[in-house]
Amino acid sequence: MHAARNDPAQIAMVRKLSRRARRICSVCTGAFLLAEAGLLQQRKVVTHWRSCAQLSNEYPDIRVLADPIWVRDGKIWTSAGVTAGIDLTLALIEDDLGSALALQVARRLVVYLRRAGGQTQHSAPLALQSDDTFGPLMEWVLANLHKPLTVEQLANRSGMAPRTFHRHSLARTRLTPAKAIERLRLDRARALIETTALSLAAIAARVGFQSEERLRRCFYRSFGVAPTRYRQGFRSIGNGALADAD
């Protein structure tokens, strides 16, 4: 990418193609090419989180957002890391052809149409798993999502005081411990909604939500769709039957 953005012929081609394109997209550090071509001035954009500061410093007339998976500003669409290009592509399909087809493509690719917690590059589960202190705790939490999980309990298993644990969680995940646990529960709930015929009440109990209503509220807040409607759409486009589970 850096060699390409220092090649005048490459940049000229980007500018030429952009003039007749209905929309312009970049994946990961491809945003640097668009920036060098002068296509991102005064735009909100995103790139891989490790390159956000560099992009902002080198092109101060661009509004670089560090957190989102992808960003749309007019006809410019930019995405974060390489896999975020899949999220961006699903968004393009949904924009052109509707959510039903986008969901069908997502299922074929075995990915989520929308990631838990909105558009964010920062994954609580991945951040926890990669942490020397939180790694073992993560395994225990995933095996015990159905149980009440308090900050005091998690801190004790980590050998920390509750305040220290809370601060460490925020530093590693940008989430409070309660929000991180909610993300994990939502991920598990969504997988069960997609792959089983369990009732929402049973799923809520299995993943540790206190009630079906709380599952509904959290699911809608994170994904913008009710869990029942999500399941209906997922089932209607699938080729196989949902599996029963106890």
Image (cartoon, grey):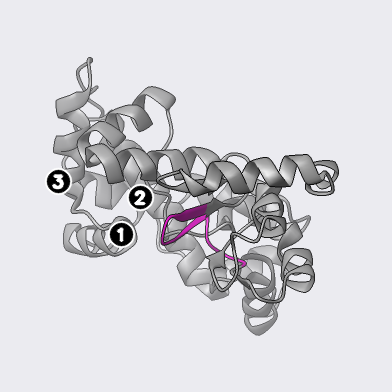
Helix, strand or loop status at disc 2: helix
Callout 2 amino acid: Val
Q: Which mark is residue 175?
A: none
Q: Quadrant of residue 165?
A: bottom right
Magenta stretch in the rendered image: 66-77
Callout 3 amino acid: Thr
Residue on which disc 1 sits: 209
Relative image position of residue 223 (x, y in whole percent): 31, 55
- Depth check: 222 or 2 in front? 2
Q: Residue at x 17, y 36 (%)?
A: 233
Q: Which mark is residue 207?
A: 2
Q: Residue at x 75, y 58 (%)?
A: 50
Farthest residue in the bottom direction?
Answer: 163
Q: Is residue 198 visible?
A: no
Q: Residues within 10 Å of mark 3 (few under 14, many from 20)?
A: few
Q: Residues within 10 Å of mark 1 (few under 14, many from 20)?
A: many
Q: Nearer the viewer, mark 3 or mark 2?
A: 3
Q: Residues within 10 Å of mark 2 (few under 14, many from 20)?
A: many
- Depth check: 214 or 23 in front? 23
The reply to whether callout 1 and callout 2 are in contact (CB within 8 Å) is yes
Residue on which disc 3 sits: 228
| Earlier-in-chain disc, 3 versus 1 | 1
